[in-house]
Amino acid sequence: MGISYHKRFQAENRLKTEATQAQAEAEDIQRTVILFKSHPVPAGLPFATILENFGIEGDRAARLIASVQPVFDLRHLRAGNELAIGRSVLGELREVRYRIDGDHLLSIAPSGDAFQSKIETISSQTETVAVACEIHDSLFQSVIDAGEKPELAMRIADIFAFDLDFYTDPRQGDTLRVVVEKKVLSDGEAVSYGRVLAAQYVNAGHSYEAILFHDDAGDPAYFQPNGQAMKRAFLHSPLKFAAPITSHFSLSRYHPILKVYRPHLGTDYGAPEGTPVQTIGDGRVVFAGRKGEDGNLVKIQHTNGYFTYYMHLSRILVHVGQHVAQGDRIGLVGMTGLATGPHLDFRIELHGQFLNFERLRLPTANPISKKDWAAFAAARDSALEQMPSTPAGGSAVAMNASH
């Protein structure tokens, strides 16, 4: 009995530590990471309408435009030029960038209730660089410690999202190697990342590899060195940086509030309130609202008879009938409904039967076709030649390039 209590005490302490680390990292990500989404400027629309189409409207758009007028004449806005909207992971507006020409950029950033606008001179070049680091605490912090920006950690998490959960899976001594394009200013400062050409993450001795190529539709996609697709119908987790699992799928679980045994047909993630929740696959929202003890619930219909459920949300960011793409933000973690603390109760259903998502084998996309194999092999070999050596302390694991 003493040993049992000691193990339970250790498990509870470990869970508390993981939850504290998750909350601190979530807050750091919310504060520092800016995710840009680029759009070509449409023809024939005033700037106010363009901003409204991108979710910036009303008085806020008017204040933004007023800050631009002293530094740039918006009548010279050119259709087709790049307009990038930068937001935090929670969707808060952080910056608007308009590419005036090849050498100048208009930057507009919130400053309290107002905005500040300036024109920046662009003097940069794109370099292909090799990055390597050893994981000591988290992927996010280890990438920063290696001298890179948080954006690169987010990109790596997206690439390996089908195989790895970057809160629960990383281990001390894991290694990361990346070949990535980096836009560098004349003073040596890196301002952004381009394409990640190849990446390898070694987790507890198991190697995960990714090579950039294109899918059957011609869109950029990642493949294993042997040509197998990395993309699956569903992501590995409904959270980009998933929190520890606090309750597993069970046909008879003791409910902490109701004090009875009953089925728990989902997986609970003990994430901090406000953590963004993403849809694990393409689909259509069929329910978005309050539903009894489930609290704020989003239900999404996918192809082939699948439905997914996202429960206890603090905020819902989608509406019924909306089509969502894999990885889109659909809500924020909360504790609405019957919940003892902030967490996400995630469930997946197939033809009316709930499945254990932790044990579900996720189907992959199509592999490299025979007609594209030679081009893929050439791109793969070129990227692998630039791969950095294994970081100090990490053991080398060869990338499997067989077909």
Image (tube, helix red, strand yellow):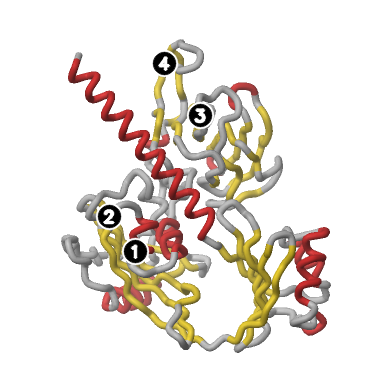
Nearer-the-camera pick, 388 or 250: 388
Mark 1: few/some/many CA within 10 Å (<14, 14-19, 20+)? some
Residue at the disc numbered 3: 341
Residue at the disc numbered 4: 254
Distance of label 3 from label 2 (alpha carbons):
29 Å
- Which residue is situated farthest in the top direction here? 260
Please tell me in which quadrant of the rendered image residue 89 appears.
Answer: bottom right
Residue 310 appears left or right of 262: right
Above/below status of 84 relative to 243: below
Residue at the disc numbered 1: 145
Q: What quarter of the picture does the C terminus occupy?
A: bottom left
Earlier in the chain: of badge 3 and badge 2, it is 2
Mark 4: few/some/many CA within 10 Å (<14, 14-19, 20+)? few
Question: Are the residues flagged by discs 4 and 3 in contact, CB closer than 8 Å?
Answer: no
Badge 4 amino acid:
Tyr
Q: Residue at x 55, y 62 (%)?
A: 34
